[in-house]
Amino acid sequence: MTRPLTIDTHAHFFPPSYIDLIAKLGGRCGTTVTKNEQGHHIIQVGLLLRTGPIVPAFYDFDARIAEMNREGVDVHVLSLTQPMVYWADDLLGLDLCIAFNDAVSQAHGQYPQRIYGFATLPMQNAQLALQELERAAKLPGIKGVYMATVVRDRDLSDRSFWPVYARCEQLGLPIFLHPMMTNNERMKQYYLINLLGNPFETAIAASHLIYGGVLDQFPQLEISLPHAGGALPILRGRLDQGWRTRAECKHLPRSPSDYLRRFTYDTISYDVDILADLVRLVGADRIMMGTDYCFDIAYTEPVQVVQQTPGLSESQRAAMLGANAARLLKIPATAA
């Protein structure tokens, strides 16, 4: 007997080799690794970006698999998260990507039915990014590319990134985005850097991909937006109004809202009615389950979220729980 897989496409991972490399060489780029009183790592990039504490769940696969089993999740597709690698110089950025990508592939080798991952690329140097893309694409378990919503001071419409997009399209590797936020005074309180900053950062990145012509230039390139698209879906009317009225927006061949189905989305909306609205807007075939594992605001019952979303057919629920991700990532869709 077989059953459909449940696949979490938004699950974070910090390999010890990545952390160790930052601890050893990050100082030359103003980045340090320390430990808190509980012995958990903290990564500090200059004065603006602090990541941690990095609790064992981020790298302990026994704990991860146990939690997946409790949640009813068959597969985690691993991705890095802040601070990523763009703060580093070119060569350290490349080495960090190699450390992460190799660790993902090794984890897949250890848990071939449970663990896959997205390759991280040193996008601060597009030539090195292409070099690592060619290498990582051949690694067992690599199923896509993970990229921030902005690379240093360059938005994703920047032409220097287009060769990477072209090669991802040729390889059939989807790109999964994640916000890249740095601390600022207005969002230091109340966790607003995540609650507000990340959703709006996703909308900004998606708007650059739409207005900047990336989606038109690479029609077969799949790009996935985290956090149920962030603020993008609710802002579609405003983006369309700009296209209708503003000279700098009229170059698009169709309205921005017509591009919404060019993206895929995860389920991390924190509200089943909002998720139901997203299904009505883009279709259940464009949405995949996610958790944001293992941050403190992550979903802990991701399967139930999909099951409790109103108005879905059983086939739509199955698609969102795993079939869509299996098709996009070329993962076997069933388990024994």
Image (cartoon, helix red, strand yellow):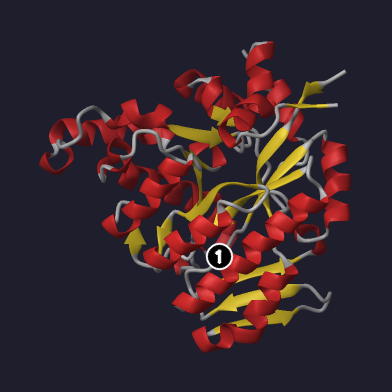
User: Does any portion of residue 9 appear in the rendered image?
Assistant: yes
Above-or-below relation of 25 to 210: below
Count neighbours of disc 1 (C-alpha within 10 A) and say few if under 14, some if 14 to 19, many if 20 or more. Answer: many
Residues 115 and 296: in front is 115
Above-or-below relation of 9 to 142: above
Tell me the SS state at disc 1.
loop
Q: Position of residue 259 (x, y in %)?
A: 34, 30
What residue do we see at 73% from left, 22% from top?
307
Relative to 249, 279 lies left or right: right
Quarter occupied by the N terminus: top right
Relative to 281, 138 lies left or right: right
The residue that label 1 is drawn on is 84
Q: Position of residue 240 (x, y in %)?
A: 26, 31
Q: Amino acid at mark 1?
A: Met
Q: Position of residue 271 (x, y in %)?
A: 62, 32
Relative to 252, 272 lies left or right: right
Quarter occupied by the C terminus: top right
Q: Position of residue 157 (x, y in %)?
A: 30, 51
Which residue is at the far bottom?
Answer: 28
Residues 235 and 101: in front is 101
Residues 147 and 126: in front is 126
User: Does any portion of residue 13 appear in the rendered image?
Assistant: no
Above-or-below relation of 291 to 197: above
What residue do we see at 64% from left, 68% from top?
99
